[in-house]
Image (spheres, rainbow, N blue to C red):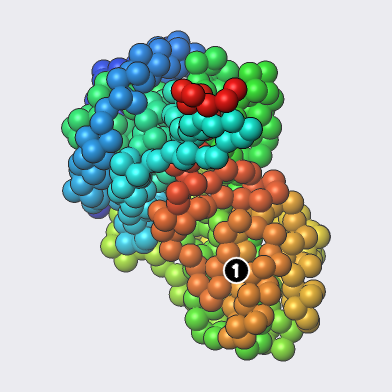
C-alpha cells in the first residue's frame, strides 16, 4: 500500500522514551523492548520500552511522594494547570490524530477521538474548585458533623488500545482534579499517544510524580494492581483480564472501576426514521474504528415489517465504504489492530457461516490486493442472526454487524437484554412513550434514543452486568476518586 506519510511521529516518541517516572523519561524498560506493528502495513515501525514490576514500583513511589503536595495545591491553581494541559492537548490535535492512525489504524478523516480526551480534561478542571463537603444534623447531642471528600492517594489506570489517549484522560483527569496522583499503564498495542500526553502534562506544569506513565504489558498491569500503595485502580479492557485483576485486588480489598465492553442492542421500530437509523446502524458497528468500540451497536434489532427496508439501507452504506491507509484523507475505514484480532474476527465470521447462525449479506473477507499486508477486514453484515449464537452473544470487536428480527416491543426488549453485557443500548422510534419505555427497560448504563450519544464529558459512561462498574465522565467520575470522611466535632457546652 502507499503510505504517503512517514511514521516519524511514533518513531520520535519512541526514541524520546515512553516511560515517565517522577518527571524523567526512560527509553528502556526492565522487561525489554517491544516492536510496535503498524496495523495498516503489518510491519514493525518503532521499538518502545517495556516496563515491568521495577518501573511500577518506582512510579508508585514517585506518585506516593508527590501526593501530599499535589493534594494541597490550591484548587484554583490545580484548575489552571489542568486547563493549560487541555489547551496543549488541543494545540496538538493533528499530531494526536496522526499518532492514532499510525499506532491503532484510526483514519485521520474519522471522528477525532482526541476531542473526547480534551473535553474530559476541561470538564475535570472545572471540578477542581467545586469539590465541597456537607454538614449534617446530629443527635442526641449537638455537634458539628462534617463530611469531607478526600482523594485516595495513588490511582492506577490501565487502558486499552482502541482509544488509549481518551481512556487515559477519562481516568486520569478526574483523578488529578480530585487531588490524587496517577500511574498510567498504557496498552502495548498503542503506547505512543499516551507518551505524548505525558510530555504535554509536563509542559502544562503538572509536577513531577503527579502523572507517571509506564508503557508495558501484563506484568506491569498486574504489578500496578498488586502494589499496596495503589489505593484504587481504573481498568479498561477484557473480562478475562478483569477477572484476574479483581482477584489480585481482592487480596487488598482494593476498589476498582471496570469498563469491560459490550454487545449493545440497537432497536429499530417500524415508526422510526429508517434513513437516519441506518446511518448509525451501519457506520457505528461495521465502519468506525473498524468496529472496535466497546459501546458500538453491534446487534441491530429490526421490527419485522421494516426489516427488508432497513437491511437494504444498511447495506447501501456499508458497501460504499472506502477502506485503506488511515493517513489518507479519503479513507473511511482502517485496519483492525493485529493479526490476532484478524484471526479472532475471521473465526467468528467463518463459524457463523458454517453454523448458519446468520446469513452473510456482505463482506466476510480479509482485504487483499494492496492492503493484504495490513489487518484489513471488509465491513461485514449478517442478517437473520440467532440471538443465542456466539456471534450475537460474544464481543467480536471487529467490523461485524448482526441483524436480528423481532415482532413486538416486548420481544425486542427481551432480545436486547438477553446478553451478559450491559454497556449501552439504543432505540429508534418516533413514539415518545415507547422511547421512554424501552430506554427504561434496557439493562444497560448508556442509552441513545434516535442517536448515538456524543460521549460528552458531562455524561457518566459505564456499564451494567458484565460490562463492569464505576463511571467515567460526569460528576460521578470525580466522585470515583474521592472518599467520604465524616468528622464529628463536639461543640463546647453541648450536653454529652
Ligand atoms: P484488549 O483485549 O482490549 O486488549 P486486555 O484486557 O487484553 O484488553 O488488555 C487491556 C489492558 O490490560 C492492556 O493495557 C493490557 O496490557 C493489560 N493487561 C493484559 N493482561 C493483563 C494482566 N494479566 N494483568 C494486568 N494487565 C493486563
Rendered image quadrant of residue 74: top left
Q: Position of residue 371 (x, y in %)?
A: 43, 54
Query: Which residue occupies the foreground of this view, 353 or 465?
Result: 465
Q: Which residue is mark 1?
A: 426
Relative horizontal placement of residue 151, taking residue 235 as reference (left or right): left
The image position of residue 337, as x and y in percent, is 49, 45
Decide: few, some or many residues near mark 1? Use Cα within 10 Å; few <14, some 14-19, many ≥20.
many
Give the camera-side residue of 313 and 132: 132
Horizontal placement of 359 versus 73: left or right? right
- Left or right, residue 318 beside residue 406: left
In-front residue for pair 411/308: 411
> How many numbered marks does the figure carry?
1
Q: Is residue 325 above or below residue 241?
A: below
Q: Tell me if residue 370 comes above or below residue 482 in the rendering.
A: below
State which quadrant residue 430 falls in: bottom right
- Residue at (54, 14) in percent of width and height: 228
User: Does 437 sit left or right of 274 as displayed?
Assistant: right
Amino acid at each position: 500500500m502507499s503510505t504517503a506519510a512517514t511514521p516519524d511521529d511514533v518513531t520520535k516518541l519512541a526514541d524520546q522514551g515512553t516511560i515517565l517516572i517522577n518527571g524523567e523519561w526512560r527509553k528502556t524498560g526492565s522487561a525489554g523492548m517491544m516492536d510496535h506493528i503498524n496495523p495498516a502495513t503489518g510491519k514493525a515501525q518503532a521499538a518502545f520500552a517495556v516496563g515491568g514490576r521495577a518501573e511500577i514500583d518506582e512510579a508508585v513511589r514517585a506518585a506516593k511522594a508527590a501526593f501530599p503536595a499535589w493534594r494541597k495545591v490550591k484548587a484554583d491553581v490545580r484548575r489552571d494547570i489542568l486547563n493549560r494541559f487541555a489547551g496543549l492537548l488541543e494545540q496538538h490535535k493533528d499530531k494526536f490524530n496522526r499518532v492514532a492512525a499510525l499506532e491503532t489504524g484510526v483514519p485521520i478523516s474519522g471522528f477525532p477521538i482526541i476531542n473526547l480526551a480534551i473535553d474530559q480534561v476541561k470538564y475535570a478542571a472545572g471540578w477542581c474548585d467545586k469539590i465541597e463537603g456537607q454538614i449534617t444534623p446530629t443527635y442526641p447531642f449537638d455537634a458539628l458533623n462534617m463530611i469531607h471528600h478526600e482523594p485516595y492517594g495513588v490511582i492506577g489506570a490501565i487502558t486499552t488500545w482502541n482509544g488509549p489517549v481518551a481512556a487515559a484522560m477519562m481516568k486520569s483527569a478526574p483523578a488529578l482534579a480530585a487531588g490524587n496522583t496517577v500511574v498510567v499503564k498504557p496498552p502495548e498495542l498503542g503506547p505512543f499517544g499516551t507518551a505524548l500526553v505525558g510530555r504535554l502534562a509536563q509542559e502544562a506544569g503538572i509536577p513531577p510524580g503527579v502523572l507517571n506513565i509506564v508503557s508495558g504489558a501484563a506484568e506491569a498491569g498486574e504489578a500496578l494492581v498488586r502494589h499496596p500503595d495503589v489505593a484504587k485502580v481504573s481498568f479498561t479492557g477484557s473480562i478475562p483480564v478483569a477477572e484476574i485483576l479483581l482477584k489480585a485486588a481482592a487480596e487488598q480489598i482494593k476498589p476498582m472501576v471496570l469498563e469491560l465492553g459490550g454487545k449493545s442492542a440497537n432497536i429499530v421500530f417500524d415508526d422510526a426514521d429508517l434513513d437516519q437509523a441506518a446511518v448509525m446502524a451501519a457506520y457505528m458497528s461495521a465502519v468506525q474504528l473498524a468496529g472496535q468500540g466497546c459501546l458500538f451497536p453491534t446487534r441491530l434489532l429490526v421490527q419485522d415489517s421494516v426489516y427488508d427496508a432497513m437491511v437494504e439501507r444498511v447495506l447501501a452504506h456499508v458497501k460504499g465504504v472506502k477502506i485503506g491507509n488511515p493517513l489518507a484523507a479519503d479513507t473511511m475505514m482502517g485496519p483492525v489492530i493485529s493479526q490476532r484480532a484478524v484471526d479472532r474476527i475471521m473465526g467468528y465470521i467463518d463459524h457463523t457461516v458454517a453454523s448458519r447462525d446468520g446469513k452473510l449479506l456482505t463482506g466476510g473477507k480479509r482485504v487483499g490486493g494492496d492492503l493484504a499486508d495490513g489487518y484489513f477486514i471488509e465491513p461485514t453484515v449478517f442478517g437473520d442472526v440467532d440471538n443465542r449464537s456466539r456471534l450475537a452473544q460474544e464481543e467480536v470487536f471487529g467490523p461485524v454487524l448482526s441483524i436480528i428480527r423481532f415482532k413486538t416491543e416486548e420481544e425486542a426488549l427481551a432480545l436486547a437484554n438477553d446478553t451478559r453485557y450491559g454497556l449501552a443500548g439504543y432505540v429508534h422510534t418516533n413514539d415518545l412513550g415507547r422511547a421512554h419505555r424501552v430506554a427504561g427497560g434496557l439493562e444497560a448504563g448508556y442509552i441513545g434514543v434516535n442517536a448515538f450519544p456524543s460521549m460528552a464529558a458531562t455524561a457518566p459512561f459505564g456499564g451494567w452486568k458484565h460490562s463492569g462498574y464505576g463511571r467515567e465522565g460526569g460528576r460521578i467520575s470525580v466522585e470515583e476518586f474521592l472518599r467520604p470522611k465524616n468528622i464529628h466535632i463536639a461543640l463546647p457546652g453541648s450536653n454529652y
